[in-house]
Amino acid sequence: MSTTIELTKKRHACIRLEKDGRRLVIDPGVFSEEDAHTGAEALLVTHEHPDHFDEARLRAALEAGPAVELWTLRSVAERIAPAFPGRVHTVGHGDTFTAAGFEVQVHGELHAVIHPDIPRVTNVGYLVDGTVFHPGDALTVPGHPVETLMLPVHAPWNKISEVIDYVREVGPRRAIDIHDALLTELARPIYDNQIGALGGAEHARMTPGDSWRL
């Protein structure tokens, strides 16, 4: 029998997953709540941009909790790993690992193009327990069935047609908005209506702090 996962939406691109009393948090960046990482024993970071990676916060979390571990790509890991031997793990596309009791697959390699004149940084997405996929800042298709897609709904690097086509290509049961701190409430109904009508999957947005059982 599968174990229920509780998904909690935090601000912007951050989510918390809880199962059997154990917590995993993805992308507690500078737009997230100060306590977004609290209680997590596993922290996952998709890339180095500050709305996903808050170095001071991660250092504080690792210092405060001797059992806390971090999984991330090399550009982030090399800035933190020396201070926390054995607790910061470098991952890349195709890797698998277990964190806080969750089975995680790593998909993707590069951040989406913001502008041709801006160099692309590395970016990875995380498929957790084969059901929840957080792509970071890219429209990575994991090549595996996805029940719940965390959908980067609004960013300097995307437009709504790309978001809709991404939902179609991944084909999840549901798509839940993330990367939404820059999207005003005036625009939300437009995104809700168009993604919901054209994406081919249940579309939802959660208020930060809200939780769903998956």
Image (cartoon, rainbow, N blue to C red):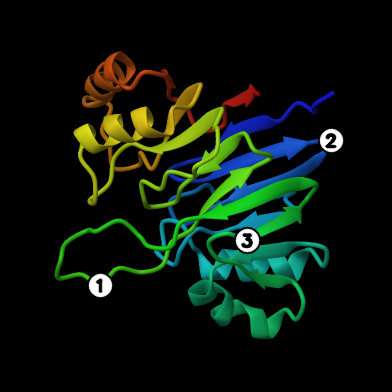
Label 2 sits on what residue type?
Asp
Residue 95 - label: 3
Q: Nearer the viewer, mark 2 or mark 3?
A: 3
Q: Inspect the image, locate mark 1, and give the three-letter code of the amino acid beneath it.
A: Pro
Q: Are marks 1 and 3 in contact (CB under 8 Å)?
A: no
Q: Within the image, what quadrant is residue 116 found in?
A: bottom left
Q: Secondary structure at mark 2?
A: loop
Amino acid on which disc 3 is placed: Asp
| Labels 1, 3: front one | 3
Q: CA distance from mark 2 to mark 3?
A: 24 Å
Sequence-wise first label, 1 or 3? 3
User: Which is closer to the viewer, label 2 or label 1?
Assistant: 1
| Foreground of the two, 33 or 116 | 116
Residue at horizontal 67%, vertical 64%? 70
User: Could you tell me residue 40's position as x and y percent?
Assistant: 72, 50
> Which residue is disc 2 drawn over?
20
How far apart marks 1 and 3 lie (CA) works out to 25 Å
- Marks 2/1: CA distance? 41 Å
Which of 212 and 127 lies nearest the eye of the viewer? 127
Mark toward the start of the polypeptide (2 vs 1): 2
Can residue 118 be seen at all in this image of the molecule? yes
Are there few (<14), some (14-19), or many (20+) residues within 10 Å of tag 2?
Answer: few
Relative to residue 16, is residue 42 depicted above or below? below
Asked if 23 appears above or below 187 in the picture, the reply is: below
**In the image, is residue 3 above or below residue 46?**
above
Is residue 206 visible in the rendered structure shown here?
A: no
Q: Is residue 197 left or right of residue 23?
A: left
Snapshot quadrant of residue 179: top left
Percent position of residue 136, x then y:
44, 51
Which of marks 3 and 2 precedes in the sequence? 2
The quarter in which the N terminus is drawn is top right
To which residue does mark 1 refer?
119
